Image (cartoon, rainbow, N blue to C red):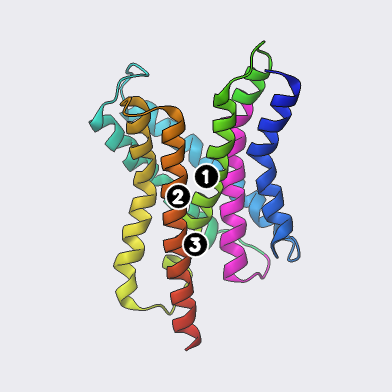
């Protein structure tokens, strides 16, 4: 990978997190500590997921898709929701609003995910003679992951932090939280099942994340409207 390609891919992967922090009220309310704590919870959650995967999943070929194994991975993936629940409700933060809290937690969660899963591949590929489109795809995936985690944190905040919400919305909130947890299994099927190429998988991921984010935003607005009414 050329030096400039490495810089471009790194900026595409990590810079949007800083832009989001500076361009939103998060920087005005000094929520950096909140994001840092959420990132620490993510690292602990990722370690717990690795232990569970090593314990309950059997070793298989990297290019083989096993539905039972992927379903088990999806169940283990629910630990992310448990981790976000812990980050939102159990950690002590300075007095910030619910809107800022879920954004700070989602931002820290997404940034930690990008660092753990994408920093090393970018650095390894930077030492190769030729650049790869996979590095650009990782950058787009990191941006989709940022939106995905903000959306998931918004849903989690509605479920666990919003005290007064319409009872009829609870099944919808839990359903879409489950959809968020199941999305990685679907993406794994598309990748390992060789259903389509990498660019199409990333395109599907971005489209799915945008749809989920719009739904989460509408649910958040609806709950806020009901509270103010």
* SS state under label 1: helix
Q: Which label sits in the foreground, 1 or 2? A: 2
Q: How far across and down, in percent of the image, does residue 58 sit?
A: 30, 22
Q: Residue at x 71, y 48 (%)?
A: 18
Q: Quadrant of residue 14?
A: top right
Residue picked out by circle 3: 154
Answer whether residue 113 is magenta in the image: yes
| In this picture, residue 38 sits left or right of residue 22 | left
- As drawn, the residue found furthest toward the top would be 129
Determine whether label 1 and label 2 are within 8 Å by CB.
yes
- As drawn, the residue found furthest toward the bottom would be 229
* SS state under label 3: helix
Q: Residue at x 56, y 32 (%)?
A: 138
Crowd rating for badge 1 (residues with CA inside 10 Å; few <14, some 14–19, many 20+):
many
- 30 or 126, which lies in front? 126
For residue 209, which numbered disc appears in the image? 2
Residue picked out by circle 1: 145
Q: Earlier in the sequence, mark 3 or mark 1?
A: 1
Q: Quadrant of residue 111?
A: top right
The residue range painted magenta reads 94-120
* SS state under label 2: helix
Magenta: main secondary structure: helix
Q: Earlier in the sequence, mark 3 or mark 2?
A: 3
* Residue 113 seen from this side: no
- As drawn, the residue found furthest toward the left would be 68
Q: How far across and down, in percent of the image, does residue 133 sit?
A: 56, 24
């Amino acid at each position: 990978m050329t030096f400039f390609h490495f810089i471009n891919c790194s900026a595409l992967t990590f810079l949007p997190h800083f832009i989001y922090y500076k361009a939103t009220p998060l920087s005005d309310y000094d929520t950096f500590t909140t994001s840092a704590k959420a990132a620490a919870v993510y690292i602990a959650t990722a370690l717990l997921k690795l232990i569970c995967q090593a314990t309950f999943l059997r070793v298989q070929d990297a290019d083989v898709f096993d539905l039972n194994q992927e379903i088990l991975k999806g169940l283990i993936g629910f630990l992310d929701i448990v981790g976000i629940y812990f980050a939102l409700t159990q950690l002590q933060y300075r007095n910030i609003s619910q809107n800022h809290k879920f954004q700070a937690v989602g931002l820290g969660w997404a940034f930690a995910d990008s660092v753990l899963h994408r920093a090393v591949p970018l650095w390894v590929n930077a030492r190769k003679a030729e650049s790869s489109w996979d590095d650009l795809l990782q950058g787009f995936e990191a941006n989709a992951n940022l939106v995905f985690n903000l959306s998931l944190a918004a849903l989690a905040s509605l479920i666990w932090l919003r005290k007064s919400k319409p009872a009829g919305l609870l099944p919808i909130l839990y359903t879409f939280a489950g959809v968020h947890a199941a999305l990685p299994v679907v993406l794994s099927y598309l990748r390992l099942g060789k259903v389509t190429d990498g660019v199409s998988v990333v395109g599907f991921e971005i489209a799915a994340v945008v749809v989920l984010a719009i739904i989460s935003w509408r649910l958040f607005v609806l709950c806020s409207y009901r509270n103010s009414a």
